[in-house]
Structures are given as structure tokens and as C-alpha cells.
Amino acid sequence: MPPNYWLQFVEVHHLIGKSVCLDEDTDLSTLGADMQFLTVEQSIDELTNFWPGIGVAKDGYIPIAWCSTGSGDYYYININDGPNGPLYRVLHDSVGPEGYNAMDAVAKVLDHYEDLLPSVEP
């Protein structure tokens, strides 16, 4: 379940179903990002029924958006970071039942998830 601070952030800014595009210069991983925000139900489903959500959940990662360009990667916050923590991309093919190496599987996209607000598409 996403933490209350995230749910409040999404509600205040009306983000469910909206998209965000970050260029390569804004995305700390330098890949660029095109994402669409998840509903609570979608987040829980990804976290409990699918990889990589299942594999990274134990480390506090919560999916909050999916890649709208079709990569299969999801975007996460980490409950251990607290409010306005970083936004991460978790590479779907780098996490499985055998585990994962965070250095290879998790990339920081933004230092603070609130930094994505200027890029939210109407």
C-alpha cells in the first residue's frame, strides 16, 4: 500500500491517470522518462502479483507509475526515504525470484518526487 504522504500528494495534485515526460537532462539516470501514474489498486497489484514489484517490496519500494513508452519498467518511491524522497526506475528484467542487485536494477530518476510536478501533462 502506498504511504499516506504519497496518497495525499497524488490527490492534491490530481495525478492519477496523468502523464509525465522528463527529458534526458532532467532524469538523473540520463534515459529520460515517460510515465503514467497508477491508481492505488494498480500499485498494489504490481507490488503483490508481478515482478519486479514482488522482488523489491521487501526493500520498501512502492510502484507509483508505469512506463508509457512500453519498456515494462515501473517507477517507484521508497517508503524508507519518507516524504518527497527520490523517484526511482526499477528495470523489470533485472529483478526476479533469484533476487536482484540494486546497482544494476534500480536507477534514481529524481532526487525528490515533487520535482516532477512541472512536467505533468494536463
Image: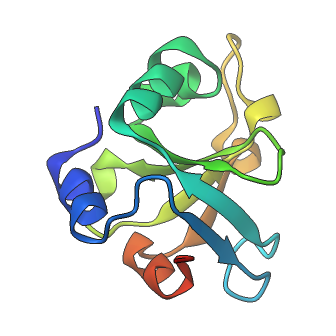
Q: Residue at coordinates 57% horizontally, 22% vertically from top-left?
A: 55
Q: Horizontal and vertical percent for residue 116?
A: 49, 77
Q: Residue at coordinates 53% horizontally, 12% vertically from top-left?
A: 49
Q: Residue at coordinates 46% horizontally, 16% vertically from top-left?
A: 48
Quadrant hosting residue 108: bottom right
Residue that lies at the very extreme toward the front in this rendered image? 122
The answer to whether residue 82 shows anywhere in this view is no
- Give the vertical position of 73 relative to 19 (above or below): above
Q: Residue at coordinates 64% horizontally, 43% vertically from top-left?
A: 102
- Give the vertical position of 80 relative to 113 (above or below): above
Viewer-proximal residue among 113 and 12: 12
**Quadrant containing the N terminus in the rendered view:** top left
Instruction: Tell me: 66 left or right of 9.
Output: right
Q: Horizontal and vertical percent for residue 72?
A: 77, 38
- Give the vertical position of 10 relative to 116 (above or below): above
Quadrant hosting residue 58: top left
Q: Horizontal and vertical percent for residue 33?
A: 72, 67
- Give the vertical position of 64 relative to 58 (above or below): below
The answer to whether residue 58 shows anywhere in this view is yes
Q: Horizontal and vertical percent for residue 120?
A: 52, 77
Quadrant hosting residue 105: top right
In this rendering, the count of numbered labels is 0
* Colour scheme of the rendered structure: rainbow
